[in-house]
Image (spheres, helix red, strand yellow):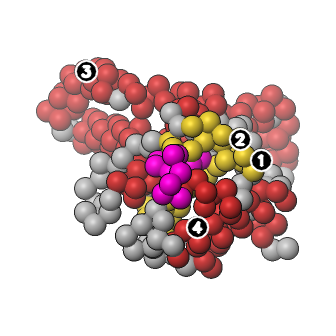
């Protein structure tokens, strides 16, 4: 007991603050990089470093020599090849909200309006691509679309995606309880694992979730099916209950969802 008390007596409040800040920074970096090419690059570097350590202490001299000889060139090549991803990650670090905002009553109402609009669009077989921003700022994609600042409502979403609307192509981006842009173009996924049955709309939806933490709702104009995308993964044939649960899991705080 005395030993534990002695250890705690040596810890300064600055040390606690230091550990806390480092933990928050690392968490933010990993959160931003999650699901991106930069995350896969980081995984590859971790395996390379592990191979370097194992070769050094296992007597694999040839492997150790090769890794040491190529290490500097590999790092330089990674910086050149992944320059856009590195730049985007650094930008997102500055733009992402430091702490997640609380879900307001208006935002909860907006989620229900999104659910109603999605079901209505699906029943009418009107294609749609709905993006809901989380912590990563989607400013780059918003700037490429038609700027809006309108309260989320079922009627608004139906009018935007109606085939006669001049801004029905592309995606809408929702931030909080506001539709901030429409007609936005999203990056297409290059993953070979995505079924060829999916068209451009689905590939754009999953492509955005591979690069950001946004969630996407995709309505097919061919089948009227609803698909959700998050973290680079698709969930097909979603009904109203599953869609509502999906949005609640992503945007509603646990204590709020129990009320």
Residue that mark 2 sits on: 149
Q: Is residue 96 above or below residue 114?
A: above
C-alpha gap between disc 4 and disc 2: 20 Å
Give coordinates of residue 56: x percent, y percent.
27, 35
- Looking at the image, is mark 4 or mark 3 earlier in the sequence? 3
Front residue of 157/177: it is 157
Numbered badge on residue 118: 4
Circle 1 residue: 101
Q: Residue at x 78, y 63 (%)?
A: 109
Q: Tag 3 or tag 1, which sits nearer the N-term?
A: 3
Task: Give the Cα distance between marks 3 and 2.
Answer: 48 Å
Q: Residue 186: x percent and y percent?
A: 44, 44
Q: Earlier in the sequence, mark 4 or mark 2?
A: 4
Gap in Å between the C-alphas at discs 2 and 1? 19 Å
Query: What residue is rendered at 55% in x and 31% in y?
Result: 143
Residue 146 vs residue 48, the one in the foreground: 146
The image shows residue 11 at horizontal and vertical percentages of 80, 34
Label 3 Cα crowd, 10 Å radius (few <14 / some 14-19 / many 20+) = few
- Residue 140 as seen in the image, left or right of residue 51: right
Q: Secondary structure at mark 2?
A: strand
**Marked residue nearer the N-terminal end (2 or 1):** 1
Categorize mark 2 by other alpha carbons within 10 Å: few (<14), some (14-19), many (20+). Answer: few
Q: Secondary structure at mark 3?
A: helix
Mark 4 surroundings within 10 Å by alpha-carbon count, few (fewer than 14), some (14 through 19), many (20 or more): many
Q: Earlier in the sequence, mark 4 or mark 1?
A: 1
For the point 47% across and 25% down, which residue is it? 87
Magenta residues, start to end: 162-173
Inter-mark Cα distance, 1 to 3: 42 Å
- Residue for badge 3: 73
Q: Quadrant of the C terminus?
A: bottom right
Residue 25: image location, x then y, percent: 64, 35
CA–CA distance between discs 4 and 1? 25 Å
């Amino acid at each position: 007991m005395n030993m534990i008390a002695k250890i705690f007596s040596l810890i300064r409040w600055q040390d606690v603050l230091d550990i806390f800040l480092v933990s928050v920074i690392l968490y933010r970096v990993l959160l931003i990089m999650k699901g991106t090419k930069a995350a896969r690059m980081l995984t590859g570097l971790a395996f390379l470093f592990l191979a370097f350590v194992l070769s050094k202490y296992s007597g694999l001299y040839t492997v150790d020599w090769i890794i040491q000889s190529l290490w500097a060139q590999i790092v330089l090549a990674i910086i050149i090849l992944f320059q856009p991803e590195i730049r985007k990650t650094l930008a997102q670090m500055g733009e992402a909200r430091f702490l997640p905002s609380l879900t307001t009553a208006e935002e909860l109402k907006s989620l229900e309006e999104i659910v109603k609009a999605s079901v209505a669009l699906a029943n009418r077989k009107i294609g749609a691509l709905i993006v809901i921003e989380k912590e990563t700022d989607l400013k780059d994609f918003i700037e490429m679309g038609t700027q809006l600042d309108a309260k989320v409502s079922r009627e608004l979403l139906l009018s935007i995606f109606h085939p006669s609307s001049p801004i029905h192509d592309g995606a809408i981006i929702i931030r909080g309880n506001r539709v901030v842009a429409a007609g936005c173009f999203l990056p297409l996924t290059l993953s070979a694992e995505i079924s060829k049955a999916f068209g451009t709309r689905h590939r754009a939806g999953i492509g955005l979730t591979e690069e950001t933490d946004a969630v996407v709702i995709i309505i097919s104009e061919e089948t009227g099916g609803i698909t959700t995308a998050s973290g680079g993964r698709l969930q097909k044939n979603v009904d109203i209950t599953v869609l509502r649960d999906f949005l609640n899991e992503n945007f509603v705080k646990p204590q709020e969802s129990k009320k």
